[in-house]
Amino acid sequence: MNLYSIETGNFKLDGGAMFGVVPKSIWQRTNPADNNNLCDWAMRSLLIEDGDRLILIDTGIGDKQSDKFFSYYFLHGEDSLTGSLNKFGFSPDDVTDVILTHLHFDHCGGSVMWKNRETGLLEPAFKNAIFWSNENHWKAATQPNNREKASFLAENILPIEESGQLKHITREGQISTSPFNNISIFFADGHTESQMVPVIKYKDKTIVFMADLLPSTGHIPLPYVMGYDTRPLLTLDEKEHFLNSAADQEYILFLEHDYYSECCTVQHTEKGVRLKDTFKLSEVL
């Protein structure tokens, strides 16, 4: 098994929205904001090469939305999904499986591309891949509540199903098996319904793709919950459970949105679970 960190580009989001009830005077110590209160965030995917399967976890924001849409998020950086795949010797056609942790636009937008912009025809960006979601989350995304409607964009989601390339991972409680060797799924419901957090066994290590359960190291203290979460009190419980396990078992936490740190470990302290170390994935493989 080989693992590759795939940078798809960066964007900006409001710091207050990203840290909920935590005051700016506190969260800006780890995530400094610009004059518009916007902080820098990564959109980082993970590529897993395992035998004859090439598994991509999340696909970033993509490039098919309108200029007006992108103007809200201030995309920046030189990285792109395809460019990062190419850097490691792969192309989108090589990907056999795409695990979508959830279907908010910054996690799945790169899954679909224009086939013909003039006619509005869309197609999956990974023509040889199976796309993996789960029935509970798919229903929530295709029949969205008013709070999340702006994050679930039909053009990012429906073409996957229409192509016949969609399959669902069966939820069997909070931790479920998956169709892949050495990967299990932790289901978390605080951010959105049935978000999938992949847990990867790599040699003697456990590497967890944290998605939006833990966007950055700045979100490690339990009350630091995003304003985007639909059930923030449930997020508190899920984070507490998971971070205690991560500290006990020395998990490597792969951070999708942290602009400054790719991975981290956590430890128990008198104040609860806190940051231990930060590093690049390649440094521990």
Image: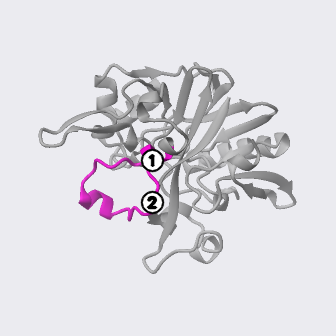
On whether residue 78 falls in the magenta region, the answer is yes
Which is nearer the eye, 184 or 260?
Answer: 260
Q: Quadrant of the N terminus?
A: top right
**Marks 1/2: CA–CA distance:** 9 Å
Question: Can you name the residue that lies furthest to the bottom here?
Answer: 35
Q: Which mark is residue 220?
A: none
Q: Which residue is labeled 2 in the image?
A: 78
Q: Quadrant of residue 277?
A: bottom right
Please provide percent x and percent y for residue 224: 63, 60
Residue at point 45% right, 59% down? 78
Mark before the other along the chain sequence, 1 or 2 = 2
Residue kind at label 1, given as amino acid type: Gly
Does residue 24 show up magenta in the picture?
no
Residue 20 visible? The answer is: no
Indicate whether 14 appears above or below 103: below
Q: Name the element at disc 2.
A: loop
Q: What residue sits 52% from the left and 60% below the top?
A: 41
To which residue does mark 1 refer? 83
Crowd tier of the residue under label 1, counting other residues whose Cα lies within 10 Å: few below 14, some 14–19, many 20 or above: some
| Region in magenta | 61-84
Kindly indicate whether the residue at mark 2 contacts the one at mark 1 (C-beta within 8 angstroms): yes
- Quadrant in the rendering for residue 199: top right
What residue lies at 62% left-to-right and 70% top-to-bottom? 27
